[in-house]
Image: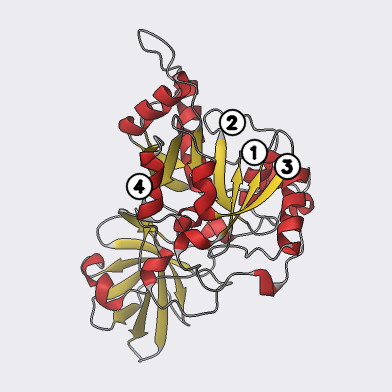
């Protein structure tokens, strides 16, 4: 298996620059894993493919308005992109600007000052604010869009899911952007159950795999949580013969991480071996072809970057050749790709 085996050619014109309006009017490519049959639908048609005993698992993380502009003592411009919070005052951040060495101070306009505490990898720094930055987000924070989106986003809420709640991501779980509250209500009326997990997405999600052998790639670590309420719904769904449908690769990573931890600890109750129980903590699960999925039965996802860990994950779920064939057809059919692009339902 080589990283080049997950490559494909995409014209820049196929990269979506703006979100679909309304959210559920984006296109939906339905891929049936068993037969390879593909159907071309509209996302709202997902109602026709989910059944009354299915469980839809959504990631309710919320994107931090993490792009912040500041100035050095000399007046020079500095850009901070907050990645992960270490404690109340300290963050890992990407910094843009010269001479940002340990001990340097930067000043957020209409906000606190920050000190460079440690140089991490490349342009990453550990910075410490003089007071918590979160209360200043509404005034000084900007939602960081992926580097391939060049259009200005008129409404920042369009880069949040309608069910977002737990603040902590540097990027949106984009498969969830297609859902409206009305669509979710329609699914509930049909008998589809809804469960939630949280995985805070890091910017590393956009990074391509550079190693020739993907198994040598050190995947990023992200924090996730699967509450007991969700675990109970998953176990009930499995016992009743329903499907667990993950919305996005972030939900997949959370579900499969929890299942892996449960299996290692051989959690058993008095009646049966639990499929899954509550889980909170970091995950660095790397899902490649050959992986045996323990929880996920179907997947709603967007179209992913070439040679990324995410296209490797969906290839593990549906087969590499089948995924690349679906991508080739999607390109020919004019589907829109990446964060604001169209969706796939892999069943």
Residue 293, disc: 2
- Whether label 1 touches label 4, CB < 8 Å: no
Nearer the N terminus, badge 1 or badge 3? 3
Give the residue number, with chain letter if any, for mark 1: 317
Q: Quadrant of the N terminus?
A: top right
| Residue situated in front as seen by the camera: 104 or 14 | 14
Q: Is residue 192 visible?
A: yes
Give me the residue at 35% from left, 47% from top: 185
Instruction: Report x, y in % for residue 43.
Output: 53, 54
Give me the residue at 35% from left, 85% from top: 71
Please, what secondary structure does the residue beneath circle 2 have?
A: loop
Q: Is residue 199 visible?
A: no
Q: CA distance from mark 3 to mark 4?
A: 29 Å
Q: CA distance from mark 1 to mark 2?
A: 8 Å
Nearer the N terminus, badge 4 or badge 2? 4
- Whether label 1 touches label 2, CB < 8 Å: yes
Give the residue number, with chain letter if any, for mark 3: 37
Residue 58 lies in quadrant: top left
Give the residue number, with chain letter if any, for mark 4: 185
Give the crowd class for mark 2: few <14, some 14-19, many >=20 residues within 10 Å. Answer: some
Please, what secondary structure does the residue beneath circle 3 have?
A: loop
Q: Is residue 16 left or right of residue 265?
A: right
Please, what secondary structure does the residue beneath circle 1 have?
A: helix
Tag nearer the camera, 4 or 2: 4
Give the crowd class for mark 1: few <14, some 14-19, many >=20 residues within 10 Å. Answer: many
Outermost residue toward the top? Answer: 270
Q: CA distance from mark 2 to mark 3?
A: 21 Å
Tag nearer the camera, 1 or 4: 4
């Amino acid at each position: 298996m080589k990283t080049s085996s997950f490559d494909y050619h995409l014209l820049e014109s196929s990269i979506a620059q703006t979100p679909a309006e309304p959210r559920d009017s984006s296109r939906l490519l339905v891929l049936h894993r068993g037969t390879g049959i593909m159907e071309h639908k509209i996302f709202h048609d997902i109602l026709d493919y989910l059944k009354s005993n299915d469980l839809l698992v959504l990631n309710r993380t919320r994107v931090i308005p993490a792009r912040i502009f500041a100035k050095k003592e000399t007046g020079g411009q500095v850009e901070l992109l907050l990645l992960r919070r270490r404690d109340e005052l300290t963050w890992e951040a990407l910094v843009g600007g010269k001479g940002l060495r340990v001990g340097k101070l930067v000043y957020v306009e209409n906000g606190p000052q920050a000190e460079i505490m440690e140089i991490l990898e490349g342009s990453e720094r550990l910075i410490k604010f003089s007071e918590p930055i979160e209360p200043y987000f509404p005034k000084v924070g900007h939602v960081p869009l992926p580097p391939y989106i060049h259009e200005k986003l008129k409404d920042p809420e369009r880069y949040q899911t309608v069910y977002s709640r737990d603040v902590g991501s540097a990027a949106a779980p984009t498969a969830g952007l297609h859902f409206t509250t009305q669509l979710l209500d329609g699914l509930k009326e049909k008998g589809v159950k809804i469960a939630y997990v949280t995985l805070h997405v890091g910017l590393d999600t956009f990074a391509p795999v550079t190693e020739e052998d993907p198994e040598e790639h050190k995947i990023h670590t992200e924090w996730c949580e699967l509450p007991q309420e969700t675990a109970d719904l998953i176990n009930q769904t499995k016992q009743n013969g329903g499907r667990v449908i993950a919305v996005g690769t972030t939900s997949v990573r959370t579900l499969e991480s929890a299942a892996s931890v449960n299996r290692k600890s051989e959690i058993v109750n008095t009646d049966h071996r639990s499929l899954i129980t509550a889980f909170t903590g970091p995950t660095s699960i790397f899902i490649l072809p050959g992986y045996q999925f323990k929880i996920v039965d179907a997947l709603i996802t967007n179209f992913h970057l070439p040679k990324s860990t995410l296209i490797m994950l969906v290839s593990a779920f549906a087969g590499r050749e089948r995924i690349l064939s679906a991508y080739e057809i999607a390109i020919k059919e004019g589907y829109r790709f990446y964060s604001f692009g169209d969706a796939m339902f892999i069943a």
